[in-house]
Amino acid sequence: MNVLYDQAGALVRRLFDLRLSGPPVLDTDTFFPDAARFVEAWRELREEALTVAMGLSGVPRFHEILPSQEDISANDARDWRILIVKAYGALVPDNAQRVPRLAALLEDCPDVLSASLSFLAPHKHIPAHRGPFRGIIRFHLGLSVPLAADGRPAAVLTIDGRDHRIGDGESLLWDDTYRHEVLNDSAEMRAALLLDVRRRGMPLDMELLSRVVIGLVRASVLLRR
C-alpha cells in the first residue's frame, strides 16, 4: 500500500510540475489575501501557541502522526512537534478548542485547507525535502522565534538554496514543492504557524485534479481520525 501511495504521489507531483511553474516565494496579496488577518492577530496566536507549549510533551511528534515522514522528523533525536488544528479541510475539534483565536480565523478563511502549530526543539534540523504537489502553497508565520547573537532570527528556512529568517510576526508564502530544510540554530524552542492554502489561478485541468487530490486526502484523514 505504501509503495502504491508513493507511486501515485510521484505521478501527481510530476503532472503539476509539468503544468505549473513559478518562483519559490509567492506574492501574498495575489495568492493569499487573507494572510493579513493572521499577521494582524500574531500576538494572540503567539499566546495560544505558548500556552500549548507549556504541555508540549502531550503534542505529538510529526512522525508519530505520519510515520512515513520519520526520515525528516526523527533524523537527529530532536523533537519536531505538531499540533494539527485543521487537516485538508477537516477541523480537529479537540485541538481547535485549545486555540480558539486561530480556530475563529480558520472558520472565516475557507482557502486555508490545513493549519498547524509547529514547535522545533533547540538545534533541531529538518533535512531537505519536497512537499507533495503544487495545488497547495505554504504560509509560514513566526510566533516565538529565538534570536541569534547578531539579533537576527536564529531559525533558518532554506528554500531552493536561499536562506529565509522569519521572525516574530513576520511571514512568508512559498511553494513547498521546492526543496527546503529548516534549522533551529539556537538553544530555545521555535514556534510557528503553518498554513496550507489552496493555490489560486491554476489552469482548469489542474484545478479539477487538485480538488480530486484534496478530496481523497480529506477522506483519508476523516477515516483515520
Image (cartoon, rainbow, N blue to C red):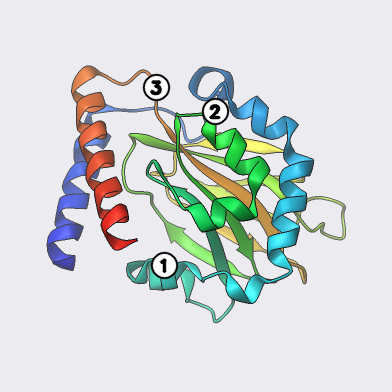
Say what amino acid the circle numbered 2 marks: Asp
The reply to whether callout 3 and callout 2 are in contact (CB within 8 Å) is no
Against 171, is 47 above or below?
A: below
Label 2, on which residue?
Answer: 108
Point out residue 194 in the picture as x, y percentages from the top left corner: 55, 47
Crowding around mark 1 (Cα neighbors within 10 Å: few <14, some 14 to 19, many 20+) is some
For residue 140, side relative to residue 11 (left or right): right
Q: Is residue 177 above or below residue 2?
A: above
* Location of mark 1 (residue): 65
Q: Specify the farthest residue to the bottom.
A: 77
Q: How far apart are marks 1 and 3 (CA)?
A: 28 Å
Is residue 144 visible to the viewer in this orientation of the structure?
A: no
How many other residues sit within 10 Å of disc 3, few (<14), some (14-19) or many (≥20)? some
For marks 1 and 3 on the same chain, the one whose residue lies earlier in the sequence: 1
Residue wearing tag 3: 200
Disc 3 element: loop
Q: Residue at x 51, y 36 (%)?
A: 174
- Inter-mark Cα distance, 2 to 1: 26 Å
